[in-house]
Amino acid sequence: MTAIFSVVGIVGTGAMGRGIAQMAAQAGSQIVLFDLQSGAAQAARDALAETWQKLVAKGKLDAAKQQSYLERIRLAETLSDLGQCDLVIEAIVEKLEVKQRLFSELEGIVPATTVLATNTSSLSVTAIGAALQHPQRLAGYHFFNPVPLMRVVEVIAGIKTDPAVCQRLTDYTRQYGHTPVVAQDTPGFIVNHAGRGYGTEALRVAGERVADFATIDRILRDQIGFKLGPFELMDLTALDVSHPVMESIYRQYYDEPRYRPSVITAQRLAGGVVGRKVGEGFYAYQEGQAQVPAEPPVPVVSALPPVWVSPKAARRAELYQLLKNLGAAIETAAAPSAQALILVAPLGHDVTTLAAVERLDPTRTVGIDMMLEDAATKRRVLATNPATRPDMRDAAHALFAKDGKPVSVIRDSAGFVSQRVVATIVNIATDMCQQGICSPADLDVAVTLGLGYPMGPLALGDRIGPTNVLEILFNLQTVYGDPRYRPSPWLRRRGALGLSLTHEEA
């Protein structure tokens, strides 16, 4: 295979630059490494040699290929040594003026046919190219760390970028086995933009004292299937990285409420409690291991009360069957008896609202999240309201834990935890489609590969049902009065017409 770019220059040889160099060398390109820091390029070459040697030791690479890859790596003493490159990728500090200065210098060194690419994750490609005489040759080429394992690359066109440049980068990405996704030049591109809902909405839940960090993490892992809970993830990435990204995207969108950051992370960042790397974040760490508080024990209840289910409960028939399987005494009268535990299963509303609207005794009313079928989840979530009696709370907990499935009991929250986080994720994703930032297919692929979600946001919205997502958002907006939850036109129209969220107009 002949590489689309035969000689690739890489400016900046940190972890990202090294990873890009590895993939480009393995695709057949000759690599020229340059770094202003003395010895950094040599250290990067040595690290690549070690990486390939480990692959040989594991039987994943033969020694001859290892040697050929290493022979493709040479070092540049000055920027002028990149003069023969037909592609130059920068992976340097995220400062606009520094990147502009670098590309202006490169423009006077490389041939007119050389493609220039920026690995920026948060800056405008158009703004970076504004300092160039020929901005049509510049594109965004955003990798994720660690590059060999994160197999998605965002290809971003600035306003003046030649489409042929993006096509060449897209084809080149496929040559080394990664998946290219094409994005417009907007804040956060695809992955960082689509990821806004997960952390920011979880922070709102925590900020309302609905549940603690560990409980929120457990719920989103066990109910939806996220590999890491949002607070585990923020501890891993560290708040000195993730909070500035939250603020940057929020400000670049002129304070759009959907992306609003949280004072929780601002305060923790100011206090240096940024995550695993310093031993303290949302969790404390000992020898790199999070110290996670134990789950509350299941209450011991001598006699369970009968259960009455609201006629407006989501998945009412399924909830009845679940109660039957758990051995509950079920009441079927039009109104609950004076002894009954009252169950509601709202979509987007809180338990308080339903108790008031349906004129239920709030002291005996408990909510259960039935957004997904019970068999599809590894955890049940119950919510009390401010008036719920402790004995009724404990009875509900004991009942729904009878078959051994974990149960989390949270304070009242419109949309519980999973509903509001998932609906926020889906809403942001559909609005990205409405803005034409990327195709629906590229969005789901990018988020699945780049963020490790169990499925893409649009597929997740289809899984729950667009009309259910709409109901959750409308009710969230009613309860909180916050434009953050206003549904995207893309979601509203497809939900109204019964179309998939991946459907594109002819």
Image: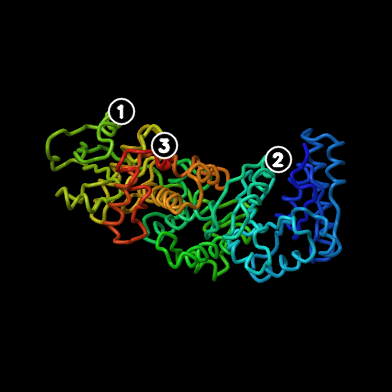
- With 246 as the anchor, is 126 left or right in this view? right
Disc nearest the viewer among 2 and 1? 2
Q: Are marks 2 and 3 in contact (CB under 8 Å)?
A: no
Is residue 428 visible to the viewer in this orientation of the structure? yes
Mark 2, residues whose alpha carbon is within 10 Å: few (<14), some, or many (≥20)? some
Residue 418 percent location from the top left of the image: 39, 47
**Element carrying mark 2:** helix
The residue depicted at 31 percent of the width and 48 percent of the height is 472
Does dot 1 land on a helix, a strand or a loop?
Answer: helix
Residue that numbered label 1 is attached to: 325
Amino acid type at mark 2: Gln
> Which amino acid type is marked by label 1?
Asn
Apparent side of residue 31 relative to residue 157 in the rendered image (left or right): right
> Crowding at label 3, few (<14), some or many (≥20) Cα neighbours within 10 Å?
some
3 vs 1, front mark: 3
**Residue 173, horizontal then vertical, whole percent:** 67, 44
* Quadrant housing residue 274: bottom right
Q: Which numbered disc flags the more N-terminal residue, 2 or 3?
A: 2
> Amino acid type of disc 3?
Thr
Write down the residue under mark 3.
Answer: 377
Figure check: 225 above or below 118 = above
Seen at 35% across and 51% down, the residue is 489
Contact, mark 3 vs mark 1 (Cβ under 8 Å): no
Q: Badge 2 is on which residue? A: 175
How far apart are the alpha carbons under marks 3 and 1? 16 Å
Q: Position of residue 390 (x, y in %)?
A: 27, 50
The alpha-carbon separation of the residues under discs 2 and 3 comes to 39 Å
Nearer to me, 244 or 173: 173
| Quadrant of the drawing holding the C terminus | top left
Q: Classify mark 1: residues with Cα within 10 Å, few (<14), some (14-19) or many (20+).
A: few
| Residue at figure coordinates x 81%, y 56% from the top left | 33
Q: Earlier in the sequence, mark 2 or mark 1?
A: 2
